[in-house]
Image: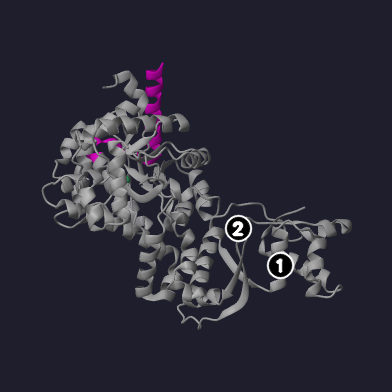
């Protein structure tokens, strides 16, 4: 099911530019120095608390930067009923944060009420496509907005799979009419672990649905690669980012660092590398950060025209 | 059970208990691929499950970990992981039942200070991210009419936590926090502590005398001032009591932990 051009124009939110994952050790610096970062991604679960420092900084930084929310516990692929208590908290947080969008992962994390706290792979079957898409629709109805699903790193595949991961991702997102958060590092990690060509993934993933990109590092053990998100973005992932932008055009991109958190300045410099690559591939990064929102506004105008 | 549910059920049983039987069940689902063998692929997930939860315990209970030392810490991690799965969507809650585990486990229950240490660290978290609320200004007592004093009720800031321990857990926690040798465990004598988050959103704690603890507990329970003063007559005489209570209220105002008088 390929959406028509007119529909596709209305799918994506305005381009945000280059962002970073907001991390606790950087709260104070971000607030004080207001660095030239276009937007921040916040981890939803960290702010599903009543108050204190997390909520204080979230609110203060949200007044100064566009925010997007990223979660890990929706367990969209589980065969348990949807966790409505979780979704209510997520919606309440979204009402407070007013994020540009909300994302989680195309995976399962819990079954029979037990949470593995891991992003476990799904079998790529048509049964799973229908199951996940149905649940995404329910979540989107409940939240009143489209969500983004992120591809996860995986270390095994199932015997009963009927298609490739990228075909599965497209099928779920088309069926559910949801969007994609493409983690370029996760594509690289899974490609190494399963022996596929990452370009096969990039050539097929539906460019009309990719709203956001994650860039991250991993741990390479030779025979296999573990997605640790605790290293700098390596050259192989930068190369793949370049290939991604060639195929998708401008997509809001950010560095996602989950462990071994460096100084804010180091992450900021790393983000500069993403800007340089985007500039090189697309030429849009020549637009200064302050004007890049104008680009977003122009894109929105195009969308509004398309809606009419 | 659908095919997907059977797969997820099998995988979860393996993650929770990665023994040979559960691994064999999983291998029926897992593809043989080039490179890494299927069992090793499964081990990556089993290791990640354990490592992630272990790290949560390590990070959230740093002083308890130091108190235990590496060997006993690993024993506690293995025991807790085996005893408690996570029903939570956030890892913030995963260690909520650690004090209970340490109180009930046949080995660790021999050392009651451990449960108190874990409990104290849990309460620090509760104070850290409790809801925000108004704080009554320090001069608020001046505005209370004389006839209102007997029926005065106090609502504390939501971060306020009262603790009662039967050990010198908090003193040990403080020593470890300052890289000092903790004192020898002392048991059997009740100790009372107040934890709260101040205006700068920093968590603080202070020890309480028994009467102060009772006074706060009474207000938390919704009792009014006249009921409280009556209760304190076994500690102070009739003339002393109002002054002591007034001083306590003034101290709480200065700490910024009263959110409302009624
Ligand atoms: Fe990611």
Q: Position of residue A40 (x, y in %)?
A: 41, 45
- Judging from the image, what secondary structure is the residue with disc 2 in? loop
Image: B207 above or below A56: below
User: Which residue is under mark 1?
Assistant: B214
Crowding at dot 1, Cα within 10 Å, few <14 / some 14-19 / many 20+, comes out as some
Q: Going from the N terminus, do you reach mark 1 or mark 2 first?
A: 2
Quarter of the rendering occupied by the N terminus of chain B: top left
Crowding at dot 2, Cα within 10 Å, few <14 / some 14-19 / many 20+, comes out as many
Residue at x 26% of width, y 58% of height: B19
- Judging from the image, what secondary structure is the residue with disc 1 in? helix
Left or right, residue A204 beside residue A59: left
Residue at x 26% of width, y 36% of height: A283
Q: Which residues are magenta?
A: A279-308
Residue at x 55% of width, y 51% of height: A51
The residue lying toward the viewer, choosing from A66 and A92, is A92
- Cβ atoms under marks 1 and 2 closer than 8 Å: no
On the same chain, marks 1 and 2? The answer is yes
Residue extending furthest right?
B147
Residue A299 lies in the magenta-colored region: yes
The residue lying toward the viewer, choosing from B144 and B150, is B150
Question: Which mark is on residue A55?
Answer: none
Q: Position of residue A100 (x, y in %)?
A: 43, 36
The residue lying toward the viewer, choosing from A180 and A124, is A124
Q: Nearer the viewer, mark 1 or mark 2?
A: 1
Q: What is the quadrant of residue B165 in the picture?
A: bottom right
Which secondary structure is most common in the magenta stretch?
A: helix
Left or right, residue A18 beside residue B220: left
User: Which residue is under mark 2?
Assistant: B159
Q: What is the quadrant of residue A178 in the picture?
A: top left
Badge 2: chain ID: B
Q: Can residue A271 be seen? A: no
The residue lying toward the viewer, choosing from B19 and B140, is B19
């Amino acid at each position: 099911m390929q959406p028509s051009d007119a529909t596709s124009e209305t799918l994506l939110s305005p381009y945000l530019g280059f962002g970073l994952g907001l991390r606790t050790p950087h709260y104070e610096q971000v607030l004080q120095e207001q660095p030239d970062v276009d937007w921040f991604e916040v981890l939803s679960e960290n702010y599903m608390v009543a108050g204190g420092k997390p909520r204080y900084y979230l609110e203060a930084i949200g007044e100064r930067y566009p925010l997007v929310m990223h979660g890990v516990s929706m367990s969209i692929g589980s065969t348990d009923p949807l966790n409505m208590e979780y979704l209510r908290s997520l919606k309440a947080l979204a009402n407070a944060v007013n994020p540009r969008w909300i994302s989680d992962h195309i995976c399962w994390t819990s079954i029979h009420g037990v949470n593995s706290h891991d992003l476990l792979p799904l079998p790529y079957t048509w049964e799973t496509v229908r199951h996940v898409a149905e649940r995404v629709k329910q979540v989107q109805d409940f939240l009143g907005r489209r969500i983004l699903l992120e591809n996860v790193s995986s270390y095994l595949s199932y015997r009963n799979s009927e298609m490739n991961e990228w075909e599965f991702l497209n099928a779920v997102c088309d069926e559910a009419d949801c969007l994609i958060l493409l983690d370029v590092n996760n594509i690289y990690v899974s490609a190494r672990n399963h022996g596929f060509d990452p370009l096969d993934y990039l050539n097929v993933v539906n460019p009309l649905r990719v709203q956001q990109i994650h860039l991250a590092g991993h741990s390479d053990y030779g025979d296999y690669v573990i997605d640790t998100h605790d290293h700098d973005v390596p050259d192989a992932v930068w190369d793949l980012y370049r290939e991604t932008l060639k195929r998708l055009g401008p997509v809001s991109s950010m560095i996602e660092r989950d462990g071994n958190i460096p100084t804010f300045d180091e992450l900021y410099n790393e983000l500069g590398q993403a800007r340089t690559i985007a500039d090189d591939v697309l030429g849009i990064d020549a637009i200064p950060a302050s004007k890049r929102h104008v680009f977003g506004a122009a894109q929105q105008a195009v969308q509004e025209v398309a809606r009419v | 059970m659908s095919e997907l549910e059977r797969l997820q059920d099998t995988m979860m049983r393996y993650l929770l208990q990665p023994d040979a039987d559960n691994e064999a069940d999983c291998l029926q689902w897992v593809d043989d691929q080039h490179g890494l063998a299927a069992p090793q692929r499964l081990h990556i997930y089993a290791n990640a499950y354990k490592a992630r939860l272990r790290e949560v315990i390590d990070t959230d209970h740093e002083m308890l970990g130091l108190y235990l030392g590496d060997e006993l810490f690993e024993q506690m991690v293995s025991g807790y992981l085996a005893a408690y799965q996570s029903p939570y969507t956030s890892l913030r809650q995963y260690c909520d039942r650690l004090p209970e585990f340490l109180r009930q486990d046949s080995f660790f229950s021999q050392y009651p200070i451990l449960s108190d240490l874990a409990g104290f660290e849990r309460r620090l978290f509760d104070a850290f991210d409790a809801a925000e609320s108004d704080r009554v200004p320090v001069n608020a007592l001046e505005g209370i009419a004389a006839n209102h004093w007997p029926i005065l009720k106090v609502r504390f800031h939501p971060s306020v936590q009262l603790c009662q321990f039967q050990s010198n857990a908090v003193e040990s926690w403080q020593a470890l926090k300052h890289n000092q040798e903790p004192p020898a465990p002392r048991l059997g004598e009740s100790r009372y502590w107040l934890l709260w988050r101040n205006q700068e959103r920093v968590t603080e704690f202070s020890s309480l005398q028994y009467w102060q603890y009772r006074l706060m507990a009474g207000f938390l329970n919704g009792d009014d001032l006249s009921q409280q003063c009556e209760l304190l007559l076994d500690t102070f005489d009739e003339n002393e009591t109002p002054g002591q209570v007034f001083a306590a209220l003034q101290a709480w105002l200065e700490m910024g932990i009263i959110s409302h008088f009624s």
